[in-house]
């Protein structure tokens, strides 16, 4: 990761030496199944990509961003708002990312750098296939396009928000799940996500 950060710094110095910087932490993947399915190495790689890489890259680039001012957008998920059985480690990584981004935003107050945690729900990407699910595991009516998520994210950044849940259906869902006791919402999540295991897992 240090080599990657060094390359980013080199490119910025050569091609965009001045002005604010926007860092977008958007890499990540999931793993659907009963832990540690599909295997422990896959789970540990997910922790490295979803958590360690985000923290490390941001930490390595932050001194430069502070000097030039700018913003850091980190993609979390609606999975960050409740435990997610059958996506246990994935949901936990997104809960980390959400809380870390919000805390970092407060630490950076007054420095000319802001952070935004973006919490989308199901989105038209390769996420489900990479997690071991068939395309269409979630109904299209419950998802958003990548363009919709990007538009709402940039609007939230322009308004100075520290967090945005994209899509009104996702906003309702996270508002409700945040109010319920964690054991209750975990049981509800398990019933919903178990249906994917019964009907939608790729063979």
Image (cartoon, rainbow, N blue to C red):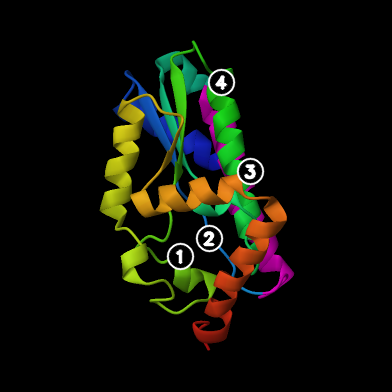
Q: Is residue 148 magenta?
A: no
The answer, for residue 96, to whether it is visible in the render is yes
Closer to the camera in the image, 186 or 39: 186
Q: Please, which residue is most extreme toward the bottom here?
A: 203
Closer to the camera in the image, 195 or 87: 195
**Majority secondary structure of magenta residues:** helix
Crowding near pointer 2: few (<14 within 10 Å), some, many (20+)? some
Q: Regarding mark 4 in the picture, which secondary structure is present there?
A: helix
Name the image quarter holding the N terminus: top right
Crowding near pointer 1: few (<14 within 10 Å), some, many (20+)? some
From the viewer's perspective, is residue 30 above or below residue 195?
above
Is the residue under label 2 in contact with that under label 1 (CB below 8 Å)?
Answer: yes
Q: Where does the image place residue 94, in percent across and percent down from the top left?
A: 58, 49
Q: Is residue 35 left or right of residue 69?
A: right
Q: Where does the image place residue 4, in percent across and percent down from the top left?
A: 51, 42
Q: Quadrant of residue 79?
A: bottom right
Ranked by sequence position, the earlier of labels 3 and 2 is 2
Q: Which residue is mark 3?
A: 96
Question: Which residues lie in the magenta part?
Answer: 34-62
Q: Give the CA separation, mark 4 to mark 3.
A: 16 Å
Q: Give the CA separation, mark 3 to mark 2.
A: 15 Å
Q: Which residue is mark 4?
A: 106
């Amino acid at each position: 990761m240090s080599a990657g950060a060094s390359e980013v710094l080199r490119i910025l110095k050569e091609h965009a030496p001045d002005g604010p910087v926007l860092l977008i932490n958007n890499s990540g993947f999931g793993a659907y199944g009963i832990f540690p399915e599909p295997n422990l190495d896959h789970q540990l790689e997910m922790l490295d990509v979803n958590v360690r890489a985000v923290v490390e890259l941001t930490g390595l680039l932050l001194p430069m961003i502070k000097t030039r001012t700018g913003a850091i957008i980190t993609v979390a998920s609606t999975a960050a708002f409740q435990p997610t059985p059958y996506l246990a480690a994935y949901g936990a990584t997104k809960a980390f990312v959400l809380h870390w981004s919000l805390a970092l935003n407060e630490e950076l107050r007054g420095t000319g750098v802001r952070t935004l945690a973006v919490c989308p729900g199901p989105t038209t990407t390769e996420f489900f296939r990479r997690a071991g699910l068939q395309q269409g595991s979630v109904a299209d009516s419950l998802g958003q396009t990548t363009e919709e998520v990007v538009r709402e994210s940039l609007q939230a950044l322009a308004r100075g928000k520290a967090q945005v849940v994209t899509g009104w259906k996702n906003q309702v869902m996270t508002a409700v799940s945040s109010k319920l006791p964690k054991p209750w919402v975990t049981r509800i999540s398990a019933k919903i996500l178990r249906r994917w295991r019964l009907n939608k897992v790729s063979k």
